[in-house]
Amino acid sequence: MNTEHPQPTDATAAHVVVFESPVVSRDCADALRTLGFRVTCLPVTEDNVMALMTRQPDYVLTINFNRYICEVCELLKVCYLAWVIDTPCYPIYDGAINNPHSFTFLYDAAIALRLRGRGVGQVYHLPVAANVERIAQIAPSGEDAGLACDVSFVANLTATEYGTLIQPKLSVSTRARCTALIDSLARPTELFQLDEQIDEALIAKVTSESGYPLAGEHYLSKAEKLAYLLGREHSWRERIELARQLEARFALRVYGNAEWQGQIGCYAGHADHFEQMPKIFQRSKINLNLSRSFVEYGLPMRVFDVLSGGGFLVTNDKQDLHKLFTNGKDLVIFRDTQDLLEICAYYLDHEQERQAIAAQGLSTLREHHTFLLRMIDLFTTVQTVRAGQPASLSRWYP
């Protein structure tokens, strides 16, 4: 269903079609209207994609990369803008990403740099953001008091292809090799380089024994695909283990999908992104972020969502944290499980310090990391390139 909103009175303003996604697209559309664009929001359906031929927009924006929409825009010679906020996002490795009218913005600069090294021209880095104005309109109520807890973790626990489709069919020796690779991710490095330890022999064994179609993409090798599958399995195990360690020491609540049931005792159900999550972040003394091991530099939406609600955030380390925020001032970074337990204990006993950090995190977010600023960066890059000038990877990675 077409979602129309009040538009700028200037009929000559550029028209952007924003294809809807569960999160982010609505905030992008609001920011674009503030900037003076005419915006139409549409669900991703075949009819709506084909209708681009009659709508003739100036730009099309999707959250994550859509091969089909990219190819239609190329046919129409319309600028296709993809803001990739997930890892892995397998469609970005398709050859269509290098279409002349395609501009791809990745929340993880490491992947953007890797794609540039493989010949993809118009790929850039753009971190995710927060809509502080929208969050501020969510009024607290007495009913929210039941959400109060010492530590909260809002995250889904997604069953992996490796755990459900591959591992049960592997021989003892092949499973042992894969387990060793998964365990190696407990020693994090800046770049996700698990594929360098995967040889053709292991790929052949995994493929033949499991029957899993381990296909690569134009810009993604089979070794890299297997590395992602193993990385996802590591993150599944890591989230469960960390939650168990925390609930043994603190009053922890975990919100997310039903996969958590039976894994931990503190599962509190699903949390709606737009209404309930901001209240959880406000009411929790400590909010946890655990970025997945296969995410290299980038920060997930959870970091920005927590800070936008004025929540206190404790997170594992990623390079973009040091580019976008200040450790100990806007949020707190932990090194390992023992460090996390000690940090939680300390800040539960030091309320004023905790509140001061949360307040500064919100201030930094409001000043530097809004959707309005991200859309300005995105369109500045696009217009620079269309004018025939070179554009940097991003303001943080020139």
Image (cartoon, rainbow, N blue to C red):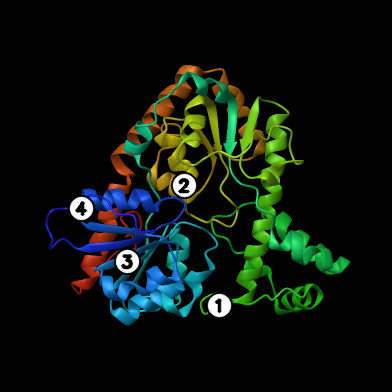
Res. 312 in view:
no
- The amino acid type of the residue labelled 4 equals Gln
Task: Tell me the kind of residue under disc 1.
Answer: Glu
Residue 18, percent across and down? 34, 60
The residue carrying pointer 4 sits among few (fewer than 14), some (14 to 19) or many (20 or more) residues within 10 Å by Cα, namely some
Q: Which residue is mark 1?
A: 217
User: N-terminal of the two: label 3 or label 2?
Assistant: 3
Indicate the quadrant where residue 141 lies: top left
Q: How many marks?
A: 4
* Residue shown at 75% from the left, 41% from the top: 263
Q: Which residue is mark 3?
A: 60
Marks 1 and 2 close (CB-CB < 8 Å): no
Tell me: 100 left or right of 293: left
Which mark is in front, 3 or 4? Answer: 4
Whole-number angstrom distance, CA of label 3 to CA of label 4 = 17 Å
What is the number of the mark on residue 301? 2
Mark 3 neighbour density, 10 Å: few (under 14) some (14–19) many (20 or more):
many
Cα gap from disc 1 to disc 4, whole angstroms: 40 Å
Disc 4 target residue? 7
96 or 319, nearer to the observer: 96
Say whether residue 348 is left or right of residue 392.
right
Where residue 151 appears, x then y in whole percent?
59, 29
x%, y% of residue 193? 59, 64
